Image (spheres, rainbow, N blue to C red):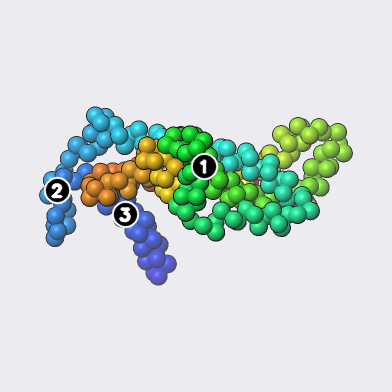
Amino acid sequence: MMSKILKYSFVLAVVFPLVFLLGLSLAQQWQFPEVLPQQWTLQHWGNSLFQQGDILKSLFLSLGLSLSLAGTVSVFAFFMSKHIAYSKHRQLYMRFTLVPYILSPVVLAVIFQYYFTVANLSGNFIGVLIAQLFFALPFGIVIFNNFWNEHLKSIEQLSFTLGASSRQSLLKVILPLSKPAIVLCFFQSFLVSWFEYGLTQFIGLGKVKTLTVMVFSFINEANVFYAALACILLILPPIVLLYMNKKILILAR
């Protein structure tokens, strides 16, 4: 009985915020102490997605930025972490990967902002991508840290002994074994970029309007209906990616 109560409580805790945000995005007037909105409308969705299209543009911009960062981090972290893991100074290098997390992203953005302005990287997509890379790449290296071990090294050397080239060993041996780690790195890097606000706001100078930036903008304007709509779109891609991540990891076993 207690397990069922806990189960249903957990489901309610997860589903209720989504239902509430969806209801708020469809409401035109919702005043206290009314339990339900007095008026319902599709105007907010129509204006944002079809007429003005601001939120829809932010959605595609966020997807492009997050997918680009996740792909870049997964590739670079994969190869960099291998060299770090097999290095004599592995512990020292791993300590360096934690340096970006000593300061908050906002403080890092303030520090980097001058250099990005001089390099003409402020206020554009590439600049924000590079700024987020400073923060996400060390995180990716940390994820791959435990993947490279002596057992995997022995398997790789065995493939060389059996006549495989470096390319064949990578494609036929290492990559199939590393699929769960790569999927995890891609998923986590996507989330880092998807929900990132400080670096994007400062380096982007308010011109790179990702969905997270739009949510805070609507909140500052006290526009709760459009903020709820943006939050719904902000939540959906990670849920889809989480489902895909689970399926890929199950198939990889």
Could you tell me residue 168's position as x and y percent? 76, 32
Amino acid type at circle 3 is Pro
Asked if 68 appears above or below 223 in the picture, the reply is above
Mark sitting earlier along the chain (3/1)? 3
Whether pointer 2 and pointer 3 mark residues with C-beta atoms closer than 8 Å, the reply is no
What residue is drawn where x is 41% and y is 48%? 197
Q: Is mark 2 on a helix, strand or loop?
A: strand
**For the residue carrying disc 1, how many other residues have a C-alpha within 10 Å: few (<14), some (14-19), or many (20+)?**
few
Is 13 situated left or right of 136 in this image? left
Is residue 47 visible from the viewing direction of this image?
yes
Mark identifier at residue 2: none
Q: Which residue, given by chain and number where applicable, does mark 1 sit on?
A: 115
Could you tell me residue 225's position as x and y percent? 23, 46
Amino acid type at circle 2 is Gln
Is residue 195 visible from the viewing direction of this image?
no
Please name whichever residue, 244 or 56, is drawn nearer the observer in this view of the structure.
56
Mark sitting earlier along the chain (2/1)? 2
